[in-house]
Amino acid sequence: MTFNTDPADSAVPDETPVPAPADIVTVMVCSSCRAEDGSDTRPRPGERLGEAVRAANDDRSIRVESVECLGNCKRRLSAALVKDGGWSYVFGDLTLENAGDLIEGARLFQTSDNGLIPWRGRPDCLKRGLISRIPPLSMLKEQK
Ligand code: FES
């Protein structure tokens, strides 16, 4: 499946099927995360991680977005994996070398049929770097 996230390509006809929204996993990379020394040098490491994740998404099967602070600033570079109808995950302690791991985890998540990122096969940084996971709203029972 291909999901075209590059606005520059939007004028180019793309005959590749676009997956239904429920199938799309989005990797949100915090572009605001700074270097460990707190320097404000641009591009920030978070911006560089976002670019590296886009480069690792060579088949464009995953949606990649840069976002502002994910509220996880003390745990180095941060990213979230989100899927409609699935759990939402926040990860920290990432490095620039984890760009491919984020795409690998997103692809695992994309093929999961229970709304979870499978533990087996999940890149190590997405195991030890897990900050939180949030269930989909559809899982919550209505309260009276
Ligand atoms: S600046 Fe990246 S999580 Fe806050």
Image (cartoon, rainbow, N blue to C red):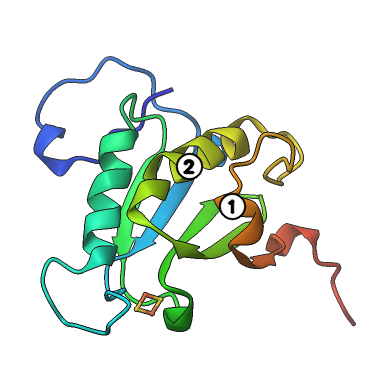
Q: Residue furthest top?
A: 15
Asked which secondary structure carries label 1, the reply is helix
Image position of 13 with respect to 101: above or below: above
Mark positioned earlier in the residue sequence (2 or 1) = 2
Q: Which mark is residue 101?
A: 2
Q: Residue at x 27, y 76 (%)?
A: 34
Name the quadrant containing residue 110.
top right
Judged from the image, the quadrant occupied by ligand 1 is bottom left
Seen at 72% across and 62% down, the residue is 135
Residue situated in front as seen by the camera: 137 or 29: 29
Residue 2 shows up from this direction: yes
Q: Assess mark 1: CB under 8 A from ligand 1?
A: no
Q: Amino acid at mark 2?
A: Asp
In the image, is residue 11 above or below residue 5? above
Residue 128 found in image quarter: bottom right
Q: Secondary structure at mark 2?
A: helix
**Whether residue 101 is situated above or below residue 69 in the rendered picture:** above
Q: Which residue is mark 1?
A: 126
Q: Hey, what amino acid is under mark 1?
A: Leu
> Residue 7: x percent and y percent?
15, 42
Q: Position of residue 80 (x, y in %)?
A: 49, 60
Q: Say whether marks 2 and 1 touch (CB < 8 Å).
A: yes
- Asked whether residue 71 is in view, the answer is no
Q: Residue at x 67, y 34 (%)?
A: 121
| Identity of the residue furthest to the front in this view | 37
Left or right side of 29 for 7: left
Across and down, in percent, residue 46 comes to 28, 65
Spatial CA distance of label 2 from label 1 is 8 Å
